[in-house]
Amino acid sequence: MFTKRIIPCLDIKDGRTVKGVNFVNLRDAGDPVELAKIYAKNGADELVFLDISATEEKRKTLIDLVLKVAEQVNIPFTVGGGISSIEDVTLLLNSGADKVSINSSAVKNPQLINDLANKFGNQCITVAIDAKRIDGIWIVHLVGGKVPTELNLFDWAKEVAERGAGEILFTSMENDGTKDGFANEALAELSSLVNIPIIASGGAGNKQHFTDAFIKGKADAALAASVFHFKEIEINELKQELQRNQIPVRL
């Protein structure tokens, strides 16, 4: 079994780290540069930086902030928000990002996945998928969860993998911020459908939830925000707990 990854997520709005519930009611969670420094020091395997309002505000990712965060971390660093071209990705990689995450732009122009994978390599390209159940069917949403599409989560995930994405970051919108656990049934189905890593996102509230995401959800990595930002879970302690549960992690 491959080593499982623990990934803190910095959701950025107006230059600050924020966190909400079900993608709304955002509250301040601190300075992203300071948080990044702490996570890199305390055992995070990777770091994700999502400029959550870039697409809605029709602007590019906050490059200055990306540069500052990149200077503080020595772990893989993924940046998302407002990315829609090869030029955008070139700028971010030159600013210290190791990978990029695309979401709305990939749905609007699926060929972008192929183009970016061909240009930069699959390992650089994460496709984020935000979805929630509507009448029992997992439906993909765009623009920070505000705009429903006609896409089924599992069909879209298969297409994303076929087009060259290196991994999928799946956020269950109905679990997001609830601290009730990850959407493990959907995660397990995703893992069985595609042969690229699946990052679980949305719902972490305690250490057991991470164990469940890896065992029941068959996730390759687990991403969380508020439980780390507000020091409800320390990453080193979480990893020790996972190791006790026979889940391979990097200590």
Image (cartoon, rainbow, N blue to C red):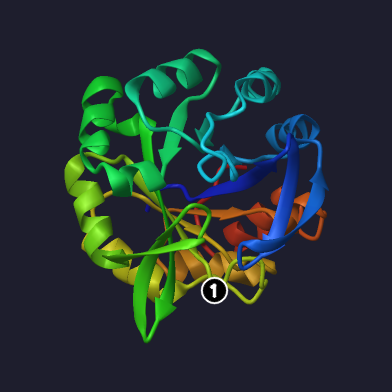
Q: Residue at x 49, y 13 (%)?
A: 94
Tell me if I can see residue 153 in this picture.
Answer: yes
Left or right of 235: which side holds 74?
left
The tally of labels here is 1
Q: Position of residue 19 (x, y in %)?
A: 71, 55
Q: Can you name the residue that lies furthest to the left here?
A: 162
Q: Which residue is mark 1?
A: 174
Q: Residue at x 26, y 30 (%)?
A: 117
Image quarter in which the C terminus is found = top right
Q: Position of residue 187 (x, y in %)?
A: 39, 67
Q: Amino acid at mark 1?
A: Glu
Left or right of 49: which side holds 123?
left
Q: Position of residue 8 (x, y in %)?
A: 63, 46
Callout 1: helix, strand or loop? loop
Q: Residues within 10 Å of mark 1 (few under 14, many from 20)?
A: some
| In the rendered image, the vertical position of residue 132 relative to residue 74, given as above or below | below
| In the rendered image, the vertical position of residue 72 relative to residue 161, given as above or below | above
Quarter of the image holding residue 202?
Answer: bottom right
Q: Position of residue 208 (x, y in %)?
A: 63, 71
